Image: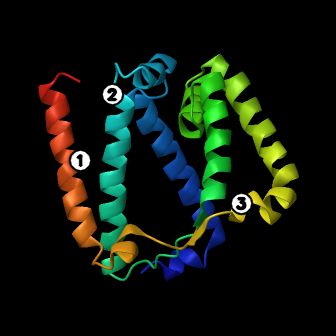
Amino acid sequence: MLEALHSRKKAQLLLGLLLGFLFGFLLQKGGVSRYDVIVGQLLLVDFTVLKIMLSAVVVGMTGIYAMKGSGWIELHPKPGSVGASLVGGLIFGVGFAVLGYCPGTVAAAAGQGSLDALAGGVAGILVGSGLFASLYPRLEKGILHWGDFGEITFPRLLKVNPWAVIIPLVGAILLLFLWMESAGL
C-alpha cells in the first residue's frame, strides 16, 4: 500500500512537514510546550507530560504493529547499545537541565513564540548537533558500541507474539491513567 509513497521523495518530505506541524500543534494544545508544565513534571506536581507521552506510546505501538500485521509496513529496528544510550541520555539530559525543554517541546515552544526556546533551544540544538557530529568519529570507534545489544525488541527478547506485550502494557497504562485521574494527578 505504501510503495507508491516510498518512491515519491517530495511527497514524503511534504507528508513529514505536515505531520511535524500536526505534532507541534498537538504538543502546544496539550500544554507541554510551556516551561512551567515541563518543570512541574520534573518536580512531580504536574503529570501532563507523562499523560501525553504514555498516550503516544499506546497509539504508536498499537498503530505500528497493526500496520505491520496488515502488511503495510516492515519493521527494521536500529541496533542499540548501552554506550549509545548513555551518550544520547547525557546530551538530552544536559539540554533538558539547562533549558527545561526536550527537542520536540522546544520546537513547539519556539513555534508559539517563546523567546527562550527560540534563542536557547534552537541554538542549543545546533551547537549540540555540531558538537556531536564533530566528535562522532571518535565516539563511533569507542563508547557508542559499548554494551551492544543489537536489534532487540521486547517481543523478540521474550520470544512472544508482539500483542502479548502490547495488550498488557496498554492495559497497565490505562489503569495508571484511571488511578491518576482518581488521585487528582
Task: Identify the residue at horizontal 47%, vertical 76% (top origin).
Answer: 75
Give the image quarter of residue 156.
Answer: bottom left
* Above or below 7: residue 145: above
CA distance for labels 3 and 1: 32 Å
List x then y, in percent, for residue 94. 66, 32
Residue type, label 1: Ile
Of label 1 and label 2, which has the lower sequence position? 2
Gap in angstroms between the C-alphas marked 1 and 2: 14 Å
Secondary structure at badge 2 equals loop
In the image, which disc is placed on residue 47? 2
**Residue at 38% over, 68% down:** 154
- Label 1 crowding class (10 Å Cα cut-off): few <14, some 14-19, many 20+? some
Kind of element beneath mark 3: helix
Q: Is residue 20 above or below residue 78?
A: above
Q: Nearer the viewer, residue 37 or 98?
A: 98
Q: Nearer the viewer, mark 3 or mark 2?
A: 3
The quarter of the picture where residue 115 lies is top right
Is the Cβ of the residue at disc 1 closer than 8 Å to that at disc 2? no
Query: Where is the N terminus found, in terms of image quarters?
Result: bottom left
- Residue 152, compared with residue 17, is above or below; it is below
User: Can you say which quadrant of the picture contains the C terminus?
Assistant: top left
Mark 2 packing: few (<14 Cα in 10 Å), some, or many (20+)?
A: some
User: Earlier along the polypeptide chain: callout 3 or callout 1?
Assistant: 3
Local SS, label 1: helix
Question: For the residue marked with disc 3, what is the amino acid?
Answer: Leu
Residue type at mark 2 is Phe
**Above or below — where is 11 with respect to 4?**
above
Q: Identify the disc placed on residue 162.
A: none
* Residue located beneath label 1 in the image: 173
Q: Which residue is mark 3?
A: 144
Q: Position of residue 15 (x, y in %)?
A: 54, 59
The tally of labels here is 3
